[in-house]
Amino acid sequence: MGRSRINPTPADIAKIELLAGRGFRLDDIAIALGISVSTLQKWKNTPAIADAYQRGRIEAISSVAGKLYDLAMAGDVTACIFYLKAQGKWIDKPQPEAPATPEIQIYLPQNNR
């Protein structure tokens, strides 16, 4: 005889949303809920759990992105650079190195030699 099926409670769904929003991995969320990772993966295939997981992730990313945007608009140079790299597709290109010693050409008269 197999074990009885564990179904998520509304409290479990809320906890999944909260923890997913804080960046926890599925392994960690399963431990926090007191279930196996395989059970959580099965739950994640249901619309209620999948939505809670995605909602948590999106809300957290949105919150952090908003704070980053506010910092960039306030003139925080680091935030500006990060924002432009992430959203504006800016990249750091290495600049070609200048030669160690400049080339000097000296022209001497032939002096009929």
Image (spheres, grey):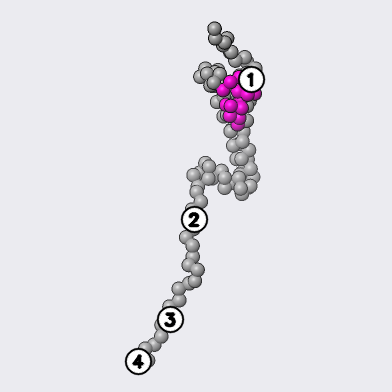
Specify the amino acid type for callout 2: Pro
Q: Residue furthest bottom?
A: 112
Q: Find the magenta span and give its range.
A: 23-37
Picture residue at 62% right of the left edge, 15% below the top: 10
Q: Mark 2 or 3 closer to N-term?
A: 2
> In the picture shown, does residue 91 fall above or below 40?
below
Q: Describe the element under mark 2 as helix, strand or loop.
A: loop
Between 42 and 91, the residue placed more toward the observer is 42
Picture residue at 63% right of the left edge, 21% below the top: 33
Of badges 1 and 4, the one in the foreground is 1
Specify the amino acid type for callout 4: Arg
**Which residue is the site of mark 1?**
34
Q: Mark 3 or 1 closer to N-term?
A: 1
What is the C-alpha distance between the residues marked 3 and 1?
81 Å
Q: Mark 4 or 2 closer to N-term?
A: 2
What is the C-alpha distance between the residues marked 2 and 3?
32 Å
What is the C-alpha distance between the residues marked 1 and 2?
50 Å
Q: Which mark is residue 106?
A: 3
Residue 54, image x, y percentages: 55, 26
Specify the amino acid type for callout 3: Ile
What is the C-alpha distance between the residues marked 4 and 2?
48 Å
Q: Describe the element under mark 3 as helix, strand or loop.
A: loop
Q: Mark 1 or 4 closer to N-term?
A: 1
Asked if the residues shown at circle 2 and circle 3 are in contact, with their CB atoms under 8 angstroms apart, the answer is: no
> In the picture shown, does residue 97 fall above or below 108?
above
Asked if the residues shown at circle 3 and circle 4 are in contact, with their CB atoms under 8 angstroms apart, the answer is: no
Asked if the residues shown at circle 1 and circle 4 are in contact, with their CB atoms under 8 angstroms apart, the answer is: no
Q: State the predominant SS element of the stretch in magenta.
A: helix
**Which residue is the site of mark 2?**
94
> If the image is split into quadrants, where does the C terminus sit?
bottom left
